[in-house]
Image (tube, grey):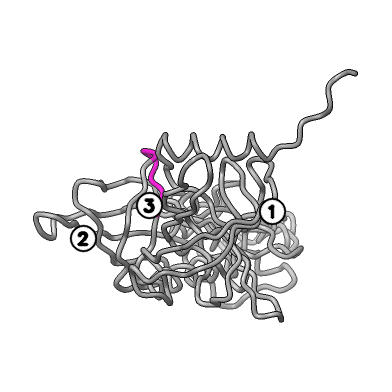
Amino acid sequence: MASIETTVAAFGASMKPERRASERHPPVHGHTRCWRRSPGARGHRAVVRPPARRCWRCGDASREATRSRSTRSRLAPPVAEGGRSLTAKMYRMLLGRAAGLLVEASVIEVSTDRHTSVEVWTISCEGIHIRASAPRLQVAQDMELTARLSIDGFPHTVSLVIEQADVLSHARASLLLRVVSATPAGYQRQSERIGLAATATLTALICGRIVPNEQVPGQLTDLSESGVCFTTADARPRSDDRMHLYCRFLEGAIDCDVRIARASSYPTGMTILGCAFIDPSPETTSVIRGVLARLTPHPPGPS
């Protein structure tokens, strides 16, 4: 009886066609993002780590899929800077550096998604997260913030989101901010500027190297409805400083806060500041328009 069973088993095995190695272990597919390969494929890894999730493109297991979709969506895509594209790792390093520079600034002026300006005090950072505080009634959780920051001498627009907002005192709130993106901000004039020469004074409000209420004398060299060009021998003002401008004309006084959009130093010892007006009053706006109307050259009428 045993010999009969052995004969039948041998006959059944001989009837099965021989399968090649690739058929025994077929490759999963040729998707570049998938890392699992068959044992018969070239470059097979002896140690296979079990995947946590499936590939979000083709459905197979991959290392890329171990990161959740929500994590990927929170990171902005790599941007181009200085003519070269940034990889995801380099871009995350850029976001971390932006967070560190914002903490070094100590006090930053940000714009909110409610079209308001808020003064934020930065305390510390860990990666792309920043511990900070702000006026309690001016911030809220999930609010989106925008700040301007100079990175390696190039102006950047930094976007942040308030992940957590807790009551710190009756006047201030404790914030946990996350840096979402940092993109190069090209300078673009909003309106035409008219050249002039007028004595003016900038008073420090929120500055990195000037104490509050200290005055910086200088001269206005051009004017537009959106800002002025201020020339001074003081080299301390820098980009993103907030100051108060005062300059008197025949039409009245320009008396409002400005933000320094750019600061350029020259070998002559002079510093040229490009300043943007911050919420000018109706009186100041009327004076600016009056000065521009007086200085704008008018074409001669028909003879």
Q: Residue at x 21, y 60 (%)?
A: 174
Give the image location of residue 189, x and y in percent.
66, 46
Q: Nearer the viewer, residue 130 or 225?
A: 225
Q: CA distance from mark 3 to mark 2?
A: 14 Å
Which quadrant would the C terminus be assigned to in this image?
top right
Q: Residue at x 65, y 40 (%)?
A: 191
To which residue does mark 3 refer? 161
Give the image location of residue 233, x and y in percent.
58, 75
Residue 111 sits inside the magenta stretch: yes
Which amino acid is tagged 3? Val
Residue 208 sits inside the magenta stretch: no
Q: Nearer the viewer, residue 244 or 260?
A: 244
Q: CA distance from mark 1 to mark 3?
A: 40 Å
The answer to whether the residue labelled 1 contacts the one labelled 3, judged by CB atoms less than 8 Å apart, is no
To which residue does mark 2 refer? 174
Which amino acid is tagged 1? His
Q: Earlier in the sequence, mark 1 or mark 3?
A: 1
Q: Residue at x 50, y 65 (%)?
A: 95
User: Residue 29 — which label?
Assistant: 1
Q: Secondary structure at mark 1?
A: loop
Q: Categorize mark 1 by other alpha carbons within 10 Å: few (<14), some (14-19), many (20+).
A: few
